[in-house]
Amino acid sequence: MSAATGTTALPAAEVAKTARNASFTIKSLPGSARDLALDAIYDALAAYKDDILAANARDMEAAEKLVDEGRLSRSLVKRLDLSRGGKYEDMLQGIKDVRGLEDPVGKTTMATKLDDGLTLHRYTTPIGTLLIIFEARPEVIANISSLAIKSGNAAILKGGKESTHSFAAIANVISEALSSTDIPPGAIQLVQSREAVKDLLDQDAYIDLVIPRGGNDLVRYIKDNTKIPVMGHADGLCATYIHEDADVRIATDVVVDGKTDYPAACNATETLIVHSKALTTVLPAVVTALQAKGVAVRCDAESHGALHAVPDTALSAAGKTILQTATTEDFTTEFLDLVIAVRTVNTLQEAVAHINAHGSGHTDCIVTSSETAADEFCRMVDSAGVYWNASTRFADGYRYGFGTEVGISTNKVHARGPVGLEGLMIYKYVVRGQGHTVGMYGSGGRKYLHEKID
Amino acid sequence: MSAATGTTALPAAEVAKTARNASFTIKSLPGSARDLALDAIYDALAAYKDDILAANARDMEAAEKLVDEGRLSRSLVKRLDLSRGGKYEDMLQGIKDVRGLEDPVGKTTMATKLDDGLTLHRYTTPIGTLLIIFEARPEVIANISSLAIKSGNAAILKGGKESTHSFAAIANVISEALSSTDIPPGAIQLVQSREAVKDLLDQDAYIDLVIPRGGNDLVRYIKDNTKIPVMGHADGLCATYIHEDADVRIATDVVVDGKTDYPAACNATETLIVHSKALTTVLPAVVTALQAKGVAVRCDAESHGALHAVPDTALSAAGKTILQTATTEDFTTEFLDLVIAVRTVNTLQEAVAHINAHGSGHTDCIVTSSETAADEFCRMVDSAGVYWNASTRFADGYRYGFGTEVGISTNKVHARGPVGLEGLMIYKYVVRGQGHTVGMYGSGGRKYLHEKID
């Protein structure tokens, strides 16, 4: 795309090739040049706020109509709206926050003296070319553009159709802003046509990593349709396990927060696993608190029976009557809503096995007073985040102190859990010699020193 | 597989599921238990040397026959032979070397105080379940089994058909040895049927990483037929660039070693890029030395012309007559043989552009007397290894000081270049609280501390 036109309509192979070529330039720019580009984007988005909000209003109008027709969910419209609750200012602040992070490029992560006059260094480098595909949330464009520039990566951004006008307006402003900086045109490209996605996913010769930001269906579609590595998560099926010795207050606080703080989030608790010995001692208080927050509680036979049998002082008669029965499917469902499934186990090992078999490897918690039990749980549960007496909702790059978040990954390679700038980096090895050859070493020849360089 | 049967004939889904279940156990064993298992393998392979070599002799016999019939290459037979040149002892020593490495599991790589009583730790963990597919070289079974056990991963190993008997013999010995240790049966499974590969590549629900060890065709087939992340390299198209100010001796040593030390290796130099100003000053000596080693030199028009025009004192008349003409294809061919393609450029930038466009991102070298030129080359060339005045053949885990090597990766995510044990690791986050909820933070509530813990 030319810097002035905002979104591009070039064929996918051209877009990808252009991005890759630009990646060679942006990855070798000094951090100061990348920071100046972030300033330029910040200033331009601040200056053109009214224009962008006007474009956003057009998207909102179209979306409201679709909601009235029952073709779009109310929550999506909320995510689309840039004008409310300081969202625009948050977007701007996000750019400043990213600018303020330490430059991740060119850090030395290994230095070895291989021999006299022969050294090995490992330096962090940008991955190269990213493809980021997202749904509603138009502010993601500014967010991801900032992250890509800060990390020295080229990025191709593909937004959802609901944010067409917002996307084009922000894209125009960003492109215009970057045209006065050292960032090469093509380093940040914005693609809007729906057909483009499939073609872009074929560009494994030029694109190094795909980052989907959206629901299950989007992520699954992408994983099924590309040979490019994908970083992200399809499901967030998080469980909280109440051990036999759990503190009632902690169990209640952690489960209620995990379930109700933001039920649509991927780190919300979906499954409640309860030790059989806690069914009558801890669970009634937890269920009472959940019901008070409007949560539908779906119980397996054992917990259902136990809850019905407790005195009305532990769980009210009204609370008992609204208990639901869990199906097998409920234990593999990401409700993203005020619904929780309750499963009873007789041992910690059974809880671990349930999580490893049915969970999504995102974030899982144990509530217990025993450090030994907590350690075993944290060691045995094979998830990106394993928690002891803390809400699953803490799984978030900002809360972890990463300053910002590229996304949350349930991958088993490269990056796992909340991913900060580090997840957009890889490294290269640099060997510096003075005419050294491998023929000089081995049987009777020279020996490698392999001394660490400080 | 039962530990006693050696290789398994179970369906791929069963093999993969069993491996994943075993991975939960092996990843939580202490380092001492994993080291004892390595001792057991070492002792058993030492004790059963004669039996294994007898089995290997049967494979050799069959292979020799195929060579005579022209259906197998002589070099493959060499790779198959376990009886020659201390190869068996090297295999045993390799197990000891892996045992001697630092335990990579459970290292703390991040520790943050999020708030009073709320901490975040990041610990290294095994990836989980590996699928390793390799061709000839039966010793890889011992090598990879050791690496998997040391790193706490479960592994499924699939060997090539040429090593059928060696593979079964080694597999039997390893399985038998492990049956007396804490390593669960199923943590190391050995699969031999050819049809199994495709089915195993479908097991992305259970297998976390595929590592192919073999030629281009194998790697490409695997990359094209799985959704599981693949770590490795298809091509090793390494270039050495002779800058205008290159030292003649260094250029000669580095190029001759890069090309001839082991031409079939992935880190051998395949392309020689020469600055036009070095065509008559440096190149003749380099070509003379290459020709003395029997290397066929395929020149582009400019280098061909220049070499023909130099006096016979610089390049002999005989040397001139055997110069070949390079085709366009020669610059994208991994010869793996005593052949090198020569390309002329007028600037360092042109050399960089050639490498980034035609290379495979493996290892590329500049020969120059200028630190500035070297820095620019190392910054701009987008390869896993970028070298200054050193042979591309140094790209190797042992030479880098990693003790051993899982393989060499040209990936842009997770691990790049020679991969040691570190490449078989990922991490998990552990949050420890006292009933903390995210609802406690933000607008008017508590603030995150994000203090580094020593």
Image (cartoon, coloured by chain):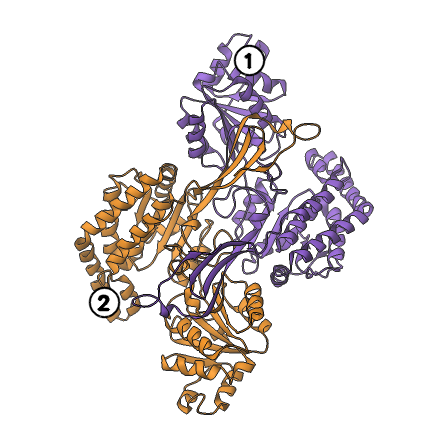
Chain colours: A purple, B orange
Depicted A378 relative to depicted A122: above or below: above
What residue does disc 1 label? A320
Q: Position of residue B443 (x, y in %)?
A: 70, 30
Q: CA distance from mark 2 to mark 1?
A: 78 Å
Helix, strand or loop for disc 1: helix
Label 2 crowd (10 A; few <14 / some 14-19 / many >=20): some
Count of number-bearing discs: 2
Q: Position of residue B234 (x, y in %)?
A: 44, 61
Residue A385: x percent and y percent?
A: 51, 36
Q: Amino acid at mark 1?
A: Lys
Q: What chain letter is assigned to the residue under label 2?
A: B
Question: For mark 2, what is the residue?
Answer: B64
Residue drawn where x is 62% and y is 38% of the image:
A398
Task: Return the residue nearer the eye: B339 or B346.
Answer: B346
* In the image: residue A105, left or right of residue B84: right
Is residue B327 shown above or below A363?
below
Residue B66 in percent (x, y) is at: 25, 67
Quadrant where the image shows the N terminus of chain B: top left
